[in-house]
């Protein structure tokens, strides 16, 4: 839809972001990957982020959070879902998506990815 | 058949069994953080790190360490807080308690945020959720602790008491502390209800019991009502300001019980109470009373009964007042006045409540039928209006009065009696030419028609038809006279005749009298003419209700006297005699002595006296047979034509009794018809059922007496319309 397209633009070419998500992929010793996003959108779409901002701890004050043990591709997929409601799940990322979404209490993605895997097995 | 599917598992490790030491390390990390939160130093902690720690413990199945640890930390913390709070003195106590509570609540939200994964994935019933656990510990160790609970409730109730006595208190503080009881309740606000609400309601009842008792003994009812209204508004505001909304209905009920329900009887009976308000048309106070009584069970019933009782009492007085019994006009005017007054009370004070209107109507029904005067009085009232009483009113005013008449009419249980009287006076108006306007007559009749249907007014309408047809007949008679041979032999007089259809008109009591020969001849001529034109009809002359004009020659002046037929006959006697006693008058005219009395009275006692009594006896009013009269030759009157009342306006007692007798006759026929109608459709019926059914069918016209119905049944059995069952004498069978 137009709305999800516009939100995809918002996610990809954010003009006034107020929060950063940082992923360091240790093994390849790559550069850290930074996702620029919006507190309001994150906290509206996710209980995890709502709690994070509400508790007003370090991340909320510094405007950034760093995740471990997750690939930037998966974070990208999930952020796109947060912004647009579209989830692009594949055989490659399904398991990782399930684990990360479970941790962050994205119940719908978690369930969906589990069903997806059951189907494919 | 199947393609080979690859589900890639990227270096994913099955979560290793977590070493106990690792679990302990994570717990200590979290414990330190929780303690920091409890000291309000959360801003340097990493949310993600703490969240991740709790997540790791849970997926490693070490949630128990975390949960029990949390319980201990909370336990410890709240016990420390208790000491701190309990030490605060006086007003500091509430402030300290509140500020610790506010902080504690925030901390619990943060702890819940950090441990969200634990809360969602580990905690299972009957374990408390993380936040509820925090609330429970506060309740257990602080709020319901003996050093806190009682002291807190007493202080809160003390403040509310002060506020009710007009002092200003800190509403925000109250709200926060009272809300605390709700927040720590795990289900259905049980802590709030048990620890606070119950005692608060008790204190409220107590406060208002003593206040209302004191206030009502020292103030007027009106002032008390205003006070109650203000109190209720205040309590409504109190609910919004700092109580839990679930208390609202209970609090208002408690107040209403104490302030209204317990004092209803007093408010009705006290000197300045309901009765006085109704008597003095204190519409606003009554309106307030209505509004307040409406709130409590059976409140309006009390008020309604009181009002209806007053209405009945006032009505009773009016219908029994001696002046009103003599003057039908005054009676009906007063009734219309109180009706207007009570309608005003109903609309201004009692919101036109259906029940109130109905009970007022019932009251009217009861006093209007207290004595049998009303039917006639109402008929007379209209009679006066239609004889010219409406002269100075516009259409709208006339309509209002007519509608009031209909309203009173509606309450009459014996509508047939009224009908007879109405027909009687209508007949008199038409025959004497005293009706002010035919249009108004017809308007009035159409209103009765609307109310009771065609049957009710068919006779009245018949009278109007007769009047029109009589005019035609009379014109025909005059033409006939001109062509008649006999005419040449007779002196000319101007005679006017009205032909009344028997049945439409009331039967006037038959009175005989001797007409002068000339008049008799004219009457015969008319009979001849009319019976020729309308074969098969029979004419009966009712001379007693006619009028006549007589020339009265005095030495210096001549007058025309407008008289009744009887008066004419009496006056004509003086052509051959100078003095006549009443006895002689009666003999000379064949009129009954009583009619002589009534006819003579206007001639000698009115404004213009054409007769005088000799010797003149001023005082004595009663006439005796031997009283002697002569013509008053000294009559002084500027008018050429002098009109005399035939008799006094109201009917004499015998005439009235005659009307009643006719009503009874009609009732017999109506009852017979009703019984036959019922039996025809039911074939067989028990005595009581027949009486009930019969009464019901006739109730729109009159209330038949049971004894009368019984007599009619007997009569119908005799006439073989009905028979008794041989085996059950109480049952009747219809005989076709």
Image (cartoon, helix red, strand yellow):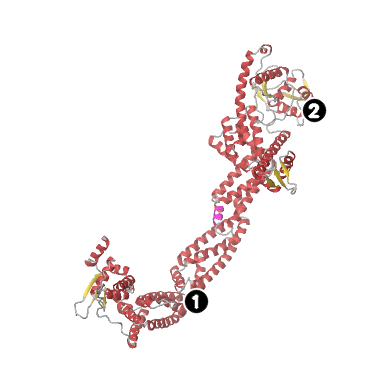
Residue drawn at the location 24% of the way across and 68% of the way down: A17
Residue bearing mark 2: B625
Residue A28: image x %, image y %?
19, 80
Q: Position of residue B572 (x, y in %)?
A: 73, 20
The answer to whether one can see residue B669 in this image is yes
Q: Residues within 10 Å of mark 2 (few under 14, many from 20)?
A: some
Q: Is residue B246 left or right of residue B314?
A: left
Counting from the top left corner in percent of width and height, residue B126 is at: 45, 77
Give the camera-side residue of B205 and B436.
B436
Q: Secondary structure at mark 1?
A: helix
Q: Is residue B170 above or below residue B519?
A: below
Residue B605 falls in image quadrant: top right
Residue segment shown in magenta: B286-291
Q: Disc 1 and disc 2: Cα gap in Å?
A: 105 Å
- Residue A83: quadrant of the picture: bottom left
Q: Is residue B413 visible?
A: no
Give the chain of mark 1. B
Judge from the rendering whether residue B688 lies leftward or rightward of residue B130; answer left or right: right
Chain ID at mark 2: B
For residue B316, side relative to residue A53 (left or right): right
Which quarter of the picture shows residue B634? Answer: top right
Q: Main secondary structure of the magenta part?
A: helix
Question: Helix, strand, or loop for circle 2?
Answer: loop
> Which residue is the site of mark 1?
B149
Tell me if residue B289 is in the magenta stretch: yes
């Amino acid at each position: 839809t137009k709305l999800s397209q516009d939100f995809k633009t918002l996610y990809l070419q954010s003009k006034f972001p107020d929060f950063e998500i940082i992923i360091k992929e240790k093994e390849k010793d790559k550069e850290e990957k930074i996702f620029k996003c919006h507190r309001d959108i994150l906290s509206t779409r996710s209980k995890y982020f709502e709690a994070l901002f509400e508790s007003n701890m370090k991340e909320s004050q510094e405007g950034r959070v760093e995740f471990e043990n997750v690939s930037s591709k998966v974070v990208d997929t999930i952020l796109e879902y947060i912004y647009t409601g579209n989830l692009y799940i594949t055989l490659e990322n399904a398991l990782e998506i399930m684990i990360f979404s479970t941790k962050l209490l994205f119940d719908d993605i978690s369930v969906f990815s589990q069903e997806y895997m059951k189907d494919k097995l | 058949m199947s393609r080979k599917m690859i589900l890639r598992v990227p270096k994913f490790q099955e979560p290793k069994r977590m070493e106990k030491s690792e679990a302990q390390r994570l717990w200590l990390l979290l414990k330190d953080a929780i303690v920091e939160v409890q000291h309000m130093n959360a801003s340097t902690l990493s949310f993600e790190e703490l969240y991740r720690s709790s997540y790791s413990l849970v997926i490693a199945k070490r949630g128990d360490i975390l949960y029990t640890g949390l319980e201990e930390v909370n336990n410890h913390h709240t016990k420390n807080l208790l000491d701190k709070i309990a030490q605060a003195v006086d007003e500091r106590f509430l402030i300290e308690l509140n500020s610790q509570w506010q902080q504690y609540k925030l901390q619990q939200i943060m702890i819940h945020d950090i441990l969200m994964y634990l809360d969602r994935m580990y905690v299972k019933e009957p374990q408390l959720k993380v936040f509820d656990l925090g609330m429970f510990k506060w309740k257990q160790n602080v709020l319901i602790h003996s050093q806190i609970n009682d002291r807190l409730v007493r202080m809160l109730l003390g403040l509310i008491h002060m506020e009710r006595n007009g002092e200003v208190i800190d509403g925000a503080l109250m709200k926060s502390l009272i809300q605390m009881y709700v927040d720590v309740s795990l289900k259905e606000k049980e802590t709030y209800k048990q620890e606070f609400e119950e005692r608060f309601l008790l204190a409220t009842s107590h406060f208002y019991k003593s206040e209302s008792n004191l206030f009502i003994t020292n103030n007027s009812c009106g002032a008390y009502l205003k006070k109650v209204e203000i109190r209720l508004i205040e309590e409504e505001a109190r609910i919004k300001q700092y109580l839990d909304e679930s208390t609202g209905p209970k609090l208002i009920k408690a107040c209403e019980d104490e302030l209204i329900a317990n004092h209803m009887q007093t408010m009705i009976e006290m000197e300045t109470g309901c009765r006085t308000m109704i008597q003095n048309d204190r519409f606003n106070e009554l309106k307030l009373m209505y509004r307040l009584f409406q709130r409590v069970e059976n409140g309006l019933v009390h008020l309604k009964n009181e009002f209806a009782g007053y209405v009945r009492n006032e009505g009773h007085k009016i219908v029994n007042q001696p002046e009103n019994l003599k003057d039908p006009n005054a009676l009906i005017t007063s009734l219309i006045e109180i009706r207007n007054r009570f309608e005003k009370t109903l609309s201004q004070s009692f919101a036109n409540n259906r029940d109130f209107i109905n009970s007022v109507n019932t009251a009217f029904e009861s006093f209007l039928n207290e004595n049998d005067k009303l039917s006639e009085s109402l008929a007379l009232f209209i009679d006066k209006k239609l004889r010219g009483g409406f002269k100075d009113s516009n259409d709208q005013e006339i309509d209002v009065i007519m509608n009031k008449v209909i309203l009173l009419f509606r309450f009459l249980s014996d509508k047939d009696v009224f009908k007879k009287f109405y027909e009687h006076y209508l007949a008199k108006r038409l025959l004497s030419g005293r009706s002010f306007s035919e249009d108004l007559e017809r308007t009035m009749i159409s209103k009765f028609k609307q109310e009771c249907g065609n049957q009710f007014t068919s006779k009245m309408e018949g009278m109007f038809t007769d009047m029109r047809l009589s005019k035609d007949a009379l014109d025909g008679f005059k033409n006939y006279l001109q062509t008649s041979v006999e005419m040449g032999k007779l002196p000319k007089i101007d005679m006017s005749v009205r032909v009344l259809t028997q049945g439409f008109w009331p039967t006037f009591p038959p009175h005989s009298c001797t007409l002068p020969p000339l008049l008799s001849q004219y009457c015969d001529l008319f009979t001849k003419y009319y019976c020729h034109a309308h074969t098969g009809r029979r004419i009966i002359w009712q001379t007693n209700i006619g009028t006549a004009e007589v020339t009265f020659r005095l030495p210096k002046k001549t007058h025309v006297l407008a008289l009744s037929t009887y008066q004419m006959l009496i006056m004509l006697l003086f052509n051959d005699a100078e003095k006549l006693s009443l006895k002689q008058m009666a003999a000379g005219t064949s009129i009954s002595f009583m009619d002589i009395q009534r006819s003579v009275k206007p001639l000698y006692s009115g404004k213009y006296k054409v007769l005088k009594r000799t010797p003149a006896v001023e005082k004595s009013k009663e006439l005796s047979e031997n009283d002697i009269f002569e013509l008053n030759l000294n009559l002084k009157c500027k008018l050429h034509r002098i009109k005399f009342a035939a008799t006094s306006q109201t009917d004499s007692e015998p005439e009235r009794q005659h009307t009643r007798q006719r009503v009874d006759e009609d009732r017999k026929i109506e009852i017979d018809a009703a019984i036959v109608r019922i039996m025809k459709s039911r074939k067989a019926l028990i005595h009581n059922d027949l009486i009930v059914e019969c009464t019901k069918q006739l109730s729109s016209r009159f209330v038949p007496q049971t004894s009368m119905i019984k007599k009619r049944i007997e009569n119908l059995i005799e006439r073989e319309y009905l028979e008794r069952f041989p085996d059950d004498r109480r049952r009747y069978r219809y005989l076709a």
